[in-house]
Amino acid sequence: GRIGIVLNGAQLFNDYENMEKSIVALDDNVTHDHASFVDECNGHPLQGLDGYRYHGVPTCVTEKVDKEGQHSSLLGVLSDGFPVYGPQGDNGVKVTNADLDKCSGHFGATPEFPNSIYHYHLTDDEAPYSIDCYHGEIDTSAQDIDAGGPPARPPRQ
């Protein structure tokens, strides 16, 4: 389900396409008639075409905002309030899952938080590409937990 929001307004989801966590969206991508379920940006439209979600590094964003030799730019914020970044760490060194804790994060300086902060990284080396657990706590009172996302919008007038 939805785990955060990307600064471009798209939702960030975990790696999986099912509740059993047996289908990894990026690894088990389906292509039919030259059209893939997960597109070249590592995302796809939401059901009913009501938005868009990423399951990994939003490459169409990172290729425009990340600079070679520098830490990835801020991509968004997870539901626990901590920032999420792309796959570049200090001095632009590629971050792998082995460099991160079980929740795909670590403490360190970022461009926006030079004095250090806990932050997440989306990775592209192997699953998990996204975040599988939260470092912080989330307030679930404003979410529709059964649907895995925010509460339904009121009908359009």
Image (cartoon, grey):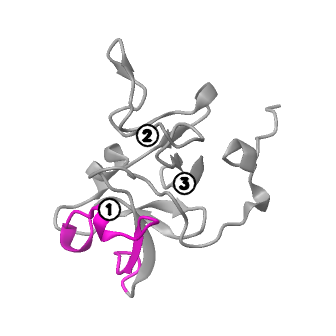
Residue 145 spot, x, y in % from top left: 73, 50
Classify mark 1: residues with Cα within 10 Å, few (<14), some (14-19) or many (20+).
many
Residue 17 left/right relative to 104? right
Above or below — where is 22 with respect to 149? above
- Residue at 67%, 47% in the rendered image: 149
Tag 2 residue: 24
Tag 3 residue: 5
- Residue at 44%, 81% in the rendered image: 117
| Callout 2 secondary element | loop
Quarter of the image holding residue 24?
top left
Above or below — where is 129 with respect to 154? below
* Residue 99 drawn in magenta: yes
- Is the stretch drawn in magenta largely helix, strand or loop? loop
- State the extent of the magenta-drawn residues as a range: 88-114
Quarter of the image holding residue 85?
bottom left
Residue 139 spot, x, y in % from top left: 72, 66
- Give amino acid for label 1: Asn
Tag 1 residue: 97
Quadrant into which the C terminus falls: top right
Residue 113 spot, x, y in % from top left: 41, 80
Q: Real-space Cα distance between discs 2 and 3?
A: 20 Å
- Of 151 and 18, nearer the camera is 18
Q: Real-space Cα distance between discs 1 and 3?
A: 21 Å
Q: Between tags 1 and 3, which lies in front? A: 1
- Give amino acid for label 3: Ile
